[in-house]
Image (spheres, coloured by chain):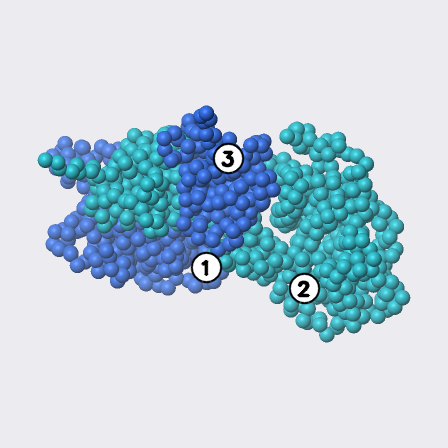
Chain colours: A cyan, B blue
Amino acid sequence: MTTKPERLFPPLGWARDYNRSILASDTLAAVIVTIMLIPQSLAYALLAGLPAEMGLYASILPLVAYALLGTSRTLSVGPVAVVSLMTATAVGNVAQSGTADYAAAAIVMAMISGLMLLLMGVLRFGFLANFLSHPVVSGFITASGIIIALSQLRHILGIQGHGDTLIELGHSLSQDLASWNPVTLATGLAATVFLFWARKGLQPLLHRLGMTAEAAGIAAKAGPVFIILATTWASYLGDFSARGVALVGEVPQGLPRFTAPSFDPQLWSELAVSAMLISIIGFVESVSVGKTLAAKRRQRIDPNQELVALGAANMASGVSGGFPVTGGFSRSIVNFDAGAQTPAASIFAAVGIALAALLLTPVLFYLPKATLAATIIVAVSSLMDMDVIRRAWRYSLSDFIAVVMTIAATLLLGVELGVLSGILASILLHLYKTARPHIAVVGAVAGTEHFRNVERHNVITHANLVSLRVDQSLYFANASFLEDTVYRLIADDENLEHLILQCTAVNEIDMSALEALEAVDHRLRELGMTLNLSEVKGPVMDALQKTDFLEHLSGRVFLTHHQAVQALKPDEIEPYIP
Amino acid sequence: MTTKPERLFPPLGWARDYNRSILASDTLAAVIVTIMLIPQSLAYALLAGLPAEMGLYASILPLVAYALLGTSRTLSVGPVAVVSLMTATAVGNVAQSGTADYAAAAIVMAMISGLMLLLMGVLRFGFLANFLSHPVVSGFITASGIIIALSQLRHILGIQGHGDTLIELGHSLSQDLASWNPVTLATGLAATVFLFWARKGLQPLLHRLGMTAEAAGIAAKAGPVFIILATTWASYLGDFSARGVALVGEVPQGLPRFTAPSFDPQLWSELAVSAMLISIIGFVESVSVGKTLAAKRRQRIDPNQELVALGAANMASGVSGGFPVTGGFSRSIVNFDAGAQTPAASIFAAVGIALAALLLTPVLFYLPKATLAATIIVAVSSLMDMDVIRRAWRYSLSDFIAVVMTIAATLLLGVELGVLSGILASILLHLYKTARPHIAVVGAVAGTEHFRNVERHNVITHANLVSLRVDQSLYFANASFLEDTVYRLIADDENLEHLILQCTAVNEIDMSALEALEAVDHRLRELGMTLNLSEVKGPVMDALQKTDFLEHLSGRVFLTHHQAVQALKPDEIEPYIP
């Protein structure tokens, strides 16, 4: 068991057993992650509409903050695709991309989002993430991936074009299409094709060229770095700038400076709703990655402590000139596969990025934006899971509706309304289903004390009683449905003397449902029948005993349904023996 | 069984058997209801901030429309307290009370609300009403009653004063208190005291004076008419107008004229949300009254046809100069008690009100508004049910929170936010509860095949297996809670070989929960354990069979939990007999 201080400050746990072998693993992982993070950080800053250096800044202090507070051993925190897109959408509503106000608003967004996550963690609101169902998350990430890929097309084509939805993007891109730039397109296409090929083809090639399989695997991760170096070199030699290719340009050299983000109350209130959505999406993405990795090594993560750690990481990003960050899927997998043992690997990676910010920025001047766009397109293509639609369709209608609603709303209305529609749709579908519960007439399976649906099994029933199994808790949304169902069932059968409700699936009876049961009991009594309950669960019985319902009940409460039927079934007629 | 045409046009059912005896009952009931409706209609028009005649107009055609389409035999439709208050609040946001625009907006409100109800009926959205739980409805009506009573105090005191919330009303009343009018107060107090007394004391008094008990009961219903005549007469003789008493004043004589309501799109969109709330509240109130009355005579009502009928009644109100109407509690009880057999009684009552509009309006000139305020206060006092707070407190925390939230929000934020808060609170509380379901470890009750919670019952368990009963459907909101619970349970017990999930209470497994179960299965397999399911319901099994979950399951699916335990429990060690 983990102790309390260790739960609040996880390094107390893992630092105790730190040794040279773990240090070696962590260092190797850090080198690989750093090489991967440099192009990713630059690319996601571009996606968020921000200067390239902010991508680096968001990959230094936040990594350290998460390493000190997070419960996942191998999660890698930093800018990620979906959160960067959401940041661009939200900040784009309050400032013009490319201005100082825009960058300042993105920094504020990291700060607000950090405070919200921290607060949710302190209040132990981690369970909120549960209301994002898997189909909604898959659908949202897939649709966001499409929006992201489409938004990067303009950098590949070398045109203007912007928008938050499929229609806006399509319209804007088609309008500017005439002004495409051949050198930009050639660079972007080359980079995209190379990166797609490198994902599968680079490792075997390097292996065939004589590297060990492991070394080839690690070197293949450097594919994005290779294409960045190659296109930067081409751009420098070929004077791409003069040929109309958009370059990253001047990137300030050095480490981020600590600054307090703006505390303009109007800006804060304008960004608050978006910050909430970014926080929740970021949290869900991060926790699902963290859980997946933890499960592989029999470790556990604590969602509420994760909220605290992600909150701290975002606040660290906010005070050091970064933008919203979270635990990313691809970077964490790389960290894990490269053998990272503890969060120290992330601290070493932060040092690596800091060195890059100090030393490498002059090189980035000539880097074509088309190359970064290519890395984004290739990265998000692996997040997309269109198959979720087919799986949901096969499995259940409500999951299908939820996933289709989420994808459609995200594509057509943008990321924020998309995720909200998904959450709302899944909650409403759940309520709709529970409002019309499955209610089965049951009978005994011969030779057992077990009762099953008369329509699905060959079971024994009795003429004077009807056994009803309600497959749902009884609460306000389905109280009158139960009443109506009972009345319909007993309306046409004059032989009935007893109704037994088998309450195995009834986990709660709220006040509305209690009133409905009282109405049923009253009605049955008037018809000369009794209402009986069986297999009532402990917590439900506790609640009923606080009322006078059981005193007035026309029938009885039985421990088992079998006992109820034995007690109420017609008396056997004794064979006449003269 | 009712036939299809009869379901859409209920008079086809009841008119067939109409005879002289039913006619006599219906006529008597109509006379009594008419006498009661006249003061009520005037009073609720006053409450809604509208001219008195609109109350009469809202009590003619709507009654006929409901009588022709409604499924309740005895429901009486017309202006009611809560809906009138909601109309005043909503219309007050778009126009100044007392202006022609205000009256026009109230007419439009009836029209929009009618169309919405009709649409909901055609789409069979009657189940929506289920999302208003009993505690929320009780709390809302109680709090509305307080607001209504307080808003009528100004008419009793003869002062200005207005507001939609407790604070606004209290503030406004206390500011104007100095300008109170002694004659108005005397009239209002006398009327209030008389009406409160008359509810209990008038019938016995008349009986003692020689009337039969039945006739006295009927005559006692005329209490409000008596006080209206008495104060009107006093006002005429005493020249109350000159003494500063507010009178009803000129009421146009004659029947309402048919007019098309305004179709100003801006006005329609401004009123749409309020109209939706008024429609839902009106529908819920009406259906609950209708159900109560129908149950007493073994009749049934059809919620979706009720929506159509109420929609038609409101549209009829809209085209004949009325305001939103619904089925009222007190008037329907009077109609029922007076012996109404069929909706024809309501048609006769509509004729009675029409005659009053033709003949009696000159008399109303001298009627003090204080008298109408007194009838409102006495009427709403019987709707209030403060005891619901105590009952909810004793029964369950979530019902208590819902009712307190509803009352507090209605009093402090007004009726519209009040009812929305109530609905939202009850849905969120339900989700919160289902997100953290009750999960019990179970064992066999000795001598039965029945399994119960080990913490509540003395049961038999086995060292190599753990039986878990999940008391909830498995869906996205509780999927990770289940995972966490299972991992916690198995973490400390090295002897475990099998986990059996008893699925009696699992009515659904959605995609998110299926993924969680797959994760659990995977984890158990890694630990050398098996995951087994028992008593899986038909619909759940159908869904699981569409996936490959069952093929990969580490354990098995058993029909009964008893069979599962028999199959998996440790082999008995044979006693050694040499």
**On the rendered structure, is A371 left or right of B119?**
right
Distance CA(mark 3)–CA(mark 1): 64 Å
- Residue identified by numbered label 2: A150
Q: Chain of mark 3?
A: B
Marks 2 and 3 sit apart, C-alpha to C-alpha, by 53 Å
**What separation in Å lies between label 1 and label 2 (alpha carbons)?**
39 Å
Viewer-proximal residue among B153 and A447: A447
For residue B465, which numbered disc appears in the image? Answer: 3
- Residue A285 spot, x, y in % from top left: 64, 48
Label drawn at residue B268: 1
Label 1: chain? B
- Name the residue type under label 2: Leu
Residue drawn at x 85%, y 47% as measured from the top left: A355
The residue drawn where x is 44% and y is 25% is B577
The image quarter containing residue A532 is top left
Q: Is residue B292 left or right of residue A255?
A: left
Spot occupied by residue A351 in the image (x, y as percentages of width and height): 82, 44
Nearest-to-viewer mark from 3 and 1 = 3
Both on one chain, marks 3 and 1? yes
First in sequence: mark 3 or mark 1? 1
